Image: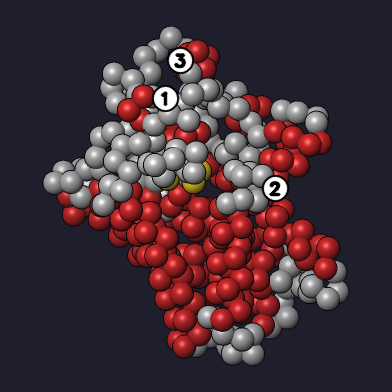
Amino acid sequence: MGTNKYNIDKKGNWIPNEPLKPVPLFTTSKPFEILKWIFGWPGYLFPWLSIYLAMAVITYLFFYPSLNETVNYNISWTSQIFFKNLIIILIVFGGFHTYLHTFEAQGDDYRYNIKKLQTNNNFWLFKNQTIENIFWTCVSGCLVWTLYEILFIWMYSNNMLSTISFQSNPVYYCLLFFLIPIWQVSYFYFSHRLTHWKPLYKWVHYLHHKNVNTGPWSGLSMHPVEHIIYFGTCLIHLVIPSDPLHVVWHLMFNGLAPAAGHSGYNEISNKKDGDNSLPHASYFHYLHHKYFECNYGELLFPFDKWFGTFHDGTKESGEKIFGTRKLKE
C-alpha cells in the first residue's frame, strides 16, 4: 500500500488506492470472507476492538471499587472512577497525538491532510486547536463518561437493573461484548443525524466540526450537550440484562475509539516495511469532517448506503450526494 507521498492530490489531500465500501458482512454471501473479516487483521475483532476490550477487563478487575463499596455515593469511589477514566484518556489520546503529531514519527505517511493542526489562531479557545480539544475532552467528555458510569454502577449495586452473569449464561454474557459495538454504531448514526438538525448543529455540534482537519484529541472534543447524547448509547443497559463489566466496556469503547478514528492518519506504518502497518483512523469519517453532509455513521453498518449519504472518497460519489454545487477541498 502506498504512502502519502504517492497518494496526494494537488491540495495535499490523501487519496486511497480504491473507493471505500461497506464491510464484507453486507457485500458478500461467502461465509469464508465474512469469517475472515470477523477474525482477520484488520477486521472486526482485531486489532482495536480486542485492545479496548482487554483494557476494560484489566481496569475493571484491578482498578475498580467493589460493588459493596458503591452502594452509596461518596467521593472516594466516584473520584476513583473519574481519575481512572482521565488517566486512560491521557494515555490513549495523548499517546496517539504525541507519536503522530508532536514527534511526527512517520512524517506525512498515510496522513489525510498534510496541513498541520492549527496554532496561534483566534478561531480556537486558547488560540490552539489541540489545547481546545484537550479542554473539551477532559473537562466535559471525561466528566459525562464518568457520570454515566457512576450512575450505572450505583444502580447495579442496589439491584435496580436486570443482570446477567457468566455462570448463569456464558454464551449470552460473552456474545454481548461483541454485539455492543454494533448497537453503538447504529445508535451513533441516528444520534449523529440528530445533531446535524439545524438548531442542534448551530448551538452544539458546531463545536466538534470546528475540526475539519482532525487530530486524536478532535475525537471527543464536543459540546457538553453532545457528550450527553453521545455517551447516552449506554442507556440500552436499562432494558437489556447485562453486567457492570459490559457497561464499563461499552463506555470505554465509546470513549476511546474516537482517538484513533480522528487521528488524521490512515495507518501507523513501519517505514522499513509498509506491510507491517497498524490500521488506524477512519477515512470514511474523515470525509464527514471534510464535507459535513455525508458519512454520518460508520462502515460497520451501512446506514449511509441505505439513506443515500454514503461517500466513498471518489469525485463521482461526491457529485451524487451534493449535486453540481462545488465540493469543499
Query: Label 3 vs label 2: CA separation?
Result: 33 Å
Q: Which amino acid type is marked by label 3? A: Lys
Observer-nearest of 264 and 180: 264
Q: Residue tagged by mark 1?
A: 15
Q: Residue at x 60, y 54 (%)?
A: 49
Q: Residues within 10 Å of mark 3 (few under 14, many from 20)?
A: few
Which numbered marker is on residue 194? none
Image marks 3 and 2: residues in contact by CB distance under 8 Å: no
Q: What's the distance in space between the residues labelled 1 and 3, CA to CA?
A: 11 Å
204 relative to 149, above or below = above
Picture coordinates of residue 48, whole percent (x, y)? 56, 53
Spatial CA span between label 2 and label 1: 27 Å
> Vertical placement of 327 versus 33: above or below?
above
Q: Amino acid at mark 1?
A: Ile
Task: Say left or right for 72 vs 16.
Answer: right
Between disc 2 and disc 1, the foreground one is: 2
Residue at image position (66%, 27%) is 306
Report the residue that reaches farthest toward the top: 324
Q: Which residue is mark 3?
A: 315
Q: Are marks 1 and 3 in contact (CB under 8 Å)?
A: no
| SS category of the residue bearing label 3 | helix
Locate residue 120 relative to residue 320 in the image: left or right: left
* Left or right: 284 as drawn, with respect to 141: right
Secondary element type, mark 2: helix
Mark 2 sits on what residue? 39
Q: Is residue 281 visible?
A: no
- Find residue 166 and report its horizontal and vertical position in percent: 79, 73
